[in-house]
Image (spheres, rainbow, N blue to C red):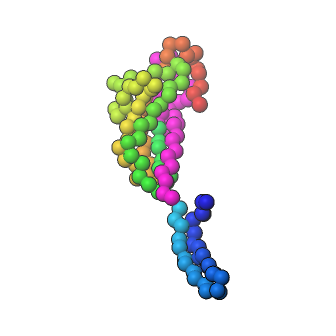
């Protein structure tokens, strides 16, 4: 059975009335809990035209109690945006999309990295990015 984290005391009484007690503590399991957010970078207009370079900020948060290691952040690009390694230090091109490798993220820590994407020729002028 699963016990919720907390302090417990177990008391046992045998057939002759002898009683024994033992106390123990169950600790909550330590976990890492990652969250990810991608937003338009400050001063980046949401209105774009073909050929524009659009700057996004990708932020990862470790909301847990353990360090997270060997993290791969993969940005699955929306249709109409393309990635170039020449415009993006710290990002690599991976089949599924651009990848940012993070070796270690301590509990309570946050890291951010900018990614630059190019608006494709098939995107209508004045498209609004959300």
Q: Is residue 127 left or right of residue 84?
A: right
In front of the other: 59 or 94: 94
Quadrant position of the C terminus in the picture: top right
Q: Is residue 86 left or right of residue 82?
A: left
- Asked if residue 8 is among those painted magenta in the image, a careful observer would answer no
Q: Is residue 20 above or below residue 100?
A: below
**Residue positioned 58% across, 82% down in the render:** 20
**Residue positioned 42% across, 28% down in the render:** 98
Quadrant position of the N terminus in the picture: bottom right
Magenta segment boundaries in residue numbering? 29-57
- Asked if residue 42 is among those painted magenta in the image, a careful observer would answer yes
For residue 117, say whether it is visible.
no
**Residue positioned 47% across, 38% down in the render:** 58
Q: Is residue 103 above or below residue 31?
A: above
Q: Position of residue 126 (x, y in %)?
A: 58, 20
**Residue positioned 64% across, 86% down in the render:** 16
């Amino acid at each position: 059975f699963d016990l919720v984290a907390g302090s417990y005391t177990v008391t046992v009484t045998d057939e002759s009335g002898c009683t024994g007690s033992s106390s123990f503590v169950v600790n909550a399991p330590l976990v890492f809990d990652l969250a990810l957010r991608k937003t338009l970078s400050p001063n980046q207009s949401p209105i774009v035209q073909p050929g524009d370079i659009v700057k996004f900020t990708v932020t990862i948060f470790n909301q847990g109690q353990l360090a997270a290691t060997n993290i791969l952040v993969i940005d699955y690009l929306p249709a109409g945006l393309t990635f170039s390694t020449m415009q993006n230090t710290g990002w690599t091109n991976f089949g599924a999309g651009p990848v940012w490798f993070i070796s270690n993220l301590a509990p309570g820590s946050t890291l951010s990295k900018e990614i630059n994407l190019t608006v494709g020729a098939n995107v209508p002028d004045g498209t609004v990015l959300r």
